[in-house]
Image (cartoon, rainbow, N blue to C red):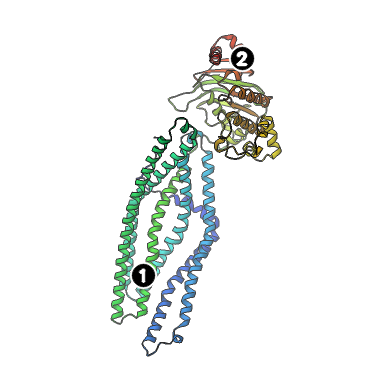
Amino acid sequence: MRGMRSDYDPEHPIDWGVIKQVWPYLMEYRFRVFLAVMCLVAAKLASVGMPFILKDIVDGLDEQLGGTHLNFVTVPIGLLLAYGAVRLASVLFGELRDTLFGRVTERAMRRIGLRVFEHLHALDLSFHLDRRTGGLSRDIERGTSGISFLMRFMIFNIVPTFLELFLVMGILWQQYSWVFALIVLVSVVSYVWYSKSATDWRTRFIREANQADNTSNTRAIDSLLNYETVKYFANEQHEAALYDQDLAAWERAKRKNRLTLFALNGGQALIISASMTAMLTMAAYEVANGNMSLGDFVLVNAFMMQIFMPLNFLGFVYREIKSSMANIERMFGLLDVTPKVVDQHDAVDLTVRSGVIEFKDVRFGYHPDRVILKGLSFTVHAGEKVAIVGGSGAGKSTIGKLLFRFYDVDDGAILIDGQDIRTTTQHSLRQAVGVVPQDTVLFNTSILENVRYGRPDANDEEVKNAIRMAHLNEFIAQLPKGYETEVGERGLKLSGGEKQRVAIARTILKSPSILLFDEATSSLDSESEKAIMAAINEISVGKSSVVIAHRLSTVVNADRIIVLEQGKMVEAGSHKSLLAARGRYSQLWQMQQEGNHA
């Protein structure tokens, strides 16, 4: 069903090895990390010191209460001030730690986000044809957020919490009895074991909720991007019903998530309550027997509160880390996708001198069991305009994709000025080839900026000159905002002909050595087609160009026309010579002429 993903496995174990991929980003700011750790240690030492000061204060007050009169002056004011100072120091060191490490976290998110973004653009066309944009964007968003949570809380919550636990257990053992330390140890081990076991059990429900969220988001974006199609077929209720199905799956997954969270939190609360009760009962017994002071009772209580507050938070942190790891795993899984089209290790920049294009016995198929091109050979000479025509499925558009190296040939070679394009860098090849596609997709910004995309460093005058050469300036002059007119998402505010002129203006601004027109007029009316063809003929002068066409009327002026049939060249020649030959081209021409007159 549309919007669903088949590669999702809720039982798949989380790969903790992704932490190794995060670690180098932490080391970019080693000194900041070191200072943050020092602040962490200082904050924990201050935190551990507070109960001792509180004990001395209580014991001092208890001694005064033993007398006939309690005088505020006799209260150990110095201890009260020290308690306030230590508490303030604990908070300030914690805040300073977060401030120092914030820069590390933000830079790591930036670096990893950019790496994923660049990798996605480096992947081949087949990946992007199969992708689900809505789900993909959610994977990236949750993955980068998960990295932030992982780095901040694992380093500054889990590690310091256990550091404090060991300090407290050592103090209780030394100051009082090994029984107090044993109670803390048993409670901590029980709490950690239960939290881990329950959270591991819950992970599948977290994944299911994420999957349902991805699916519903993908469904919504897919439907909105196809808004016009939905309206054409009056399928608003159908789309709403499909979307509601996905939302229902999300609701069920969230309900399971919530119920399992209740079980987790309830079990944790039971362990904490039992431990606190046991510890305070033991301390009260010792006070009653005169082995401990009232201050000692308060100290034990303060330590237990101090231990179980972060320990309780540790349960939340562990849950969130497990959830974050599921998200990070998905995002780093994108980085594990290997592009099928890659530059060779010794690839060189393409050097275009005259622009001769050669297809030499090219064989290619999108799938092994379906071959598209079967030993295709032809040459486009310097400055020549060659048209590729043929019926549907003949392989016309495949030629353009191979020339632009969206795919590599299975056999044979494509040469430009004698250079096999597989031995050149993709960037230099694509800089040298300008494409005007059949379906021009624009960015949701102004016409000026959409044209500037052909060469982002071009100034306004160069962009406007390209617009004039594409015969787009008359249209722009009629617009209230002129060049600054917003085109809408995917250019929906412009007609097909207007978008094609923007595409031509982009290509003019790019000023490539070779031109590729992939059925650039197939969806236009006759008037728009004539205008676009005039612009195409104008910018093609003196440049090698390949015109992939469905409408034969657009290629009658081509220097040479190549006719494809089932992936093979069956005819080649000028328009007149092919008509005179009365072969396949003549049949196609006759069929289109009869269709135009019908």
Q: Vertically, is 192 above or below 109?
A: below
Looking at the picture, how far across and down is residue 80, in whole percent?
A: 46, 79
Name the residue rendered at 48%, 77% in the picture.
Answer: 82
Label 1 vs 2, first from the N-terminus: 1
Asked whether 282 or 586 is in front, the reply is 586
Residue 539 visible in this rendered orientation of the protein? yes
Question: Residue 494 lies in what quarter of the image?
Answer: top right
Q: Which residue is mark 1?
A: 304
Q: Vertically, is 579 above or below 356?
A: above
Q: Amino acid at mark 2?
A: His
Q: Amino acid at mark 1?
A: Met
Label 1 packing within 10 angstroms: few (<14), some (14-19), many (20+): some
Question: Residue 315 lies in what quarter of the image?
Answer: bottom left
Looking at the picture, how far across and down is residue 59, in whole percent?
A: 39, 82
Asked whether 496 or 283 is in front, the reply is 496
Label 2 packing within 10 angstroms: few (<14), some (14-19), many (20+): many
Mark sitting on residue 98:
none
Q: Vertically, is 543 above or below 7?
A: above
Report if the CB atoms under discs 1 and 2 are less than 8 Å apart: no
Q: Vertically, is 159 above or below 517?
A: below
Q: Which residue is mark 2?
A: 575
Name the residue rendered at 45%, 28% in the picture.
Answer: 367
- Residue 399 falls left or right of residue 51: right
Looking at the picture, how far across and down is residue 556, in whole percent?
A: 62, 17
Q: Label 2, secondary structure: give it.
A: helix
Q: Label 1, secondary structure: give it.
A: helix
